[in-house]
Amino acid sequence: MIKLGKTYGNLMVDLRATNEKLRTRAQHIVTLAEHGGSIRAASGAPEPTAS
């Protein structure tokens, strides 16, 4: 996939968002590509806390 140019960093970016799951994934990929950070940060989920 890397040689075909279908990745951006560690994200696979050449996909067709044909259902809700893939549309959500595509939104996360775009957010990460624009702003960087983790998927957890892009989703708005809280970061884990140290015990």
Image (cartoon, rainbow, N blue to C red):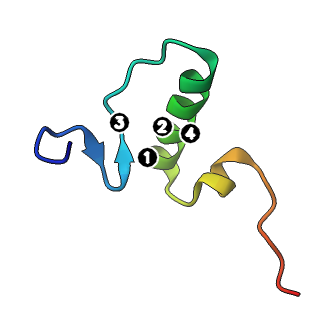
Question: Residue drawn at (50%, 30%), measured in percent from left and top?
Answer: 26
Q: Residue 30, labelled with which disc? A: 2
Q: Earlier in the sequence, mark 4 or mark 1?
A: 4
Q: Residue 13, labelled with which disc? A: 3
Q: Which residue occupies the extreme top position in the image?
A: 18
Whole-percent x, y for residue 42 in the image: 64, 49
State which quarter of the image contains the N terminus.
top left
Q: CA distance from mark 4 to mark 1?
A: 9 Å
Crowdedness of circle 2 by 10 Å Cα count: few (<14), some, many (20+)? some
Q: CA distance from mark 1 to mark 2?
A: 5 Å
Q: Mark 4, mark 1: which one is toward the viewer?
A: 4
Q: Are marks 3 and 2 in contact (CB under 8 Å)?
A: no
Q: Amino acid at mark 4?
A: His
Crowdedness of circle 4 by 10 Å Cα count: few (<14), some, many (20+)? some
Q: Amino acid at mark 1?
A: Ala
> Which residue in the structure is indicated by mark 1?
33
Q: CA distance from mark 3 to mark 4?
A: 11 Å
**Residue 13 sits above or below residue 40 on the image:** above
Question: Residue drawn at (43%, 46%), measured in percent from left and top?
Answer: 33
Q: CA distance from mark 4 to mark 2?
A: 5 Å
Q: Are marks 4 and 2 in contact (CB under 8 Å)?
A: yes
Q: Amino acid at mark 3?
A: Val
Q: Earlier in the sequence, mark 3 or mark 1?
A: 3
> Element under label 1?
helix
Q: Residue 20, labelled with which disc? A: none
Q: Which residue occupies the extreme right position in the image?
A: 51
Q: CA distance from mark 3 to mark 1?
A: 10 Å
Q: CA distance from mark 3 to mark 2?
A: 9 Å
> Picture quarter containing residue 27?
top right
Q: Is residue 48 left or right of residue 38?
A: right
Q: Nearer the viewer, residue 35 or 18?
A: 18
Q: Which residue occupies the extreme left position in the image?
A: 3
